[in-house]
Amino acid sequence: MAFEHYVRSGDRMLRCGYTTGTCAALAARGAAELLLGGTAPAEIELLTPKGLTVQVAPVLCRLEEGAAVCGVRKDAGDDPDITDGAVIVARVCRSAKPGIRIDGGEGVGRVTRPGLDQPVGEAAINHVPRQMISREIQDVCEAFDYTGGLSIEISVPDGAERAAKTFNPVLGVEGGISILGTSGIVEPMSEQAWIDTLNVQIRQAAAEGKRRLILTPGNYGMDFLKNTDWQAPVVKISNFLGEALDAAKVNGFKEVLLTGHIGKLVKVAGGIMNTHSKMADCRRELFTAHAAICGASTEVCRSLMEADTTDACIAVLKEAGLEQPVMDSLVQAIQQGLNRRVKGEYLCGAVVFSNVYGELGRTENAEEILKKWQN
């Protein structure tokens, strides 16, 4: 059954889908219901972190050698990606050890390098999907008064083949795809759809009468903003920074604060206004160039060029005692990139953070904006 939730894109309605993390949690729930209740469910449903309910019919649900196995097919809606149509399978069995243990099987990648969501050696099942799986399993255990331990293995039969077409091999995730998702829902990522939608959202924010605006690329930024008291409308802009800055000008905003993960915003230091990796990915090069300016050794520069993520770059800089000067240099360059696009039409600054290391820096204009807002 199709997931019937839509987002508007101009005069079009685009259907959303659900993440591999949601599929894994649904499959785990279905397998647990069969194992503990003795009956294969005809339908499985859960409430995603976004607050939307997903209901599916499993593509398989059976008992195998003392375990229950359930599979759910990924539906990416109108945003088909490399995992669209993949079957995410959960195998659940009783365990002599108490608690819930989650691991990856065939077709689920394993982390081989530091700096990712999970430690080296762990299955590439990110923390939000793990939380979702645990929540659904615990709910089934309570329903059937089961207090023992359970072991859950998530697999994707064709995951290795699909992963070869992703960035996983570059990032250090080997053997399969990652089980991902922070909201549980996939929103369509058509470029024109996103641009149309963010234009509408910025126009709606302007209609509120305020002349201040916060822009953020995605869910990481939204989570970061939850811990601030910055009072301004927030628009999620995906990778389309340049279009969003232009729309802010057209709609008469006077103060715009860009808040985002270093993995996205470091690209602005290179003048990049579309942060999608297919457009440009010079994160390591920018870190290395600014580190060299700050006096980094050849060895440090080489380590930065070999780093897999921006968090890994920061770890290298921390060890070398260069984090602060390099971030100061990058933040200054980010401000220059914003200034070139905005051309003095309004005050625009940026706050940069990392999920691992917290806030990393504020541009000069960001400091000025936040002082104004506090007053």
Image: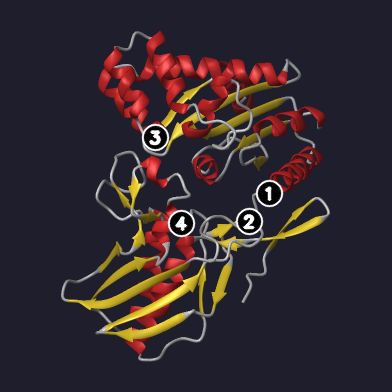
* Image position of 251 (left or right of 175): right
Name the kind of residue labelled 1 in the image: Ser
Position of 214 relative to 295 (above/below): below
Q: Nearer the viewer, residue 317 or 192?
A: 192
The local secondary structure at tag 2 comes to loop
The answer to whether the residue labelled 2 contacts the one labelled 1, judged by CB atoms less than 8 Å apart, is yes
The answer to whether the residue labelled 4 contacts the one labelled 3, judged by CB atoms less than 8 Å apart, is no
Image coordinates for residue 215, horizontal then vertical, percent: 63, 35
Q: What residue is at 39 percent from the left and 14 percent from the top?
A: 325
| Disc number placed over residue 162 in the picture, else none | 4
Name the kind of residue labelled 4 in the image: Arg
* Image position of 152 (left or right of 168): left
| Disc number placed over residue 148 in the picture, else none | none
Dot 3, how many residues are within 10 Å of its Cα: few (below 14), some (14-19), or many (20+)? many
Q: Quadrant of residue 287?
A: top left
Q: Mark 1 points at which residue?
A: 190
Gap between marks 2 and 3, in whole Å? 25 Å
Q: Nearer the viewer, residue 279 or 14?
A: 279
Q: Mark 3 points at which residue?
A: 309
Gap between marks 4 and 3, in whole Å? 21 Å
Res. 84 in view: yes
Image coordinates for residue 272, horizontal then vertical, percent: 60, 25
Extreme-bottom residue of the structure: 38
Q: Name the residue under label 2.
A: 79
The answer to whether the residue labelled 3 contacts the one labelled 1, judged by CB atoms less than 8 Å apart, is no
* Image position of 112 (left or right of 254): left
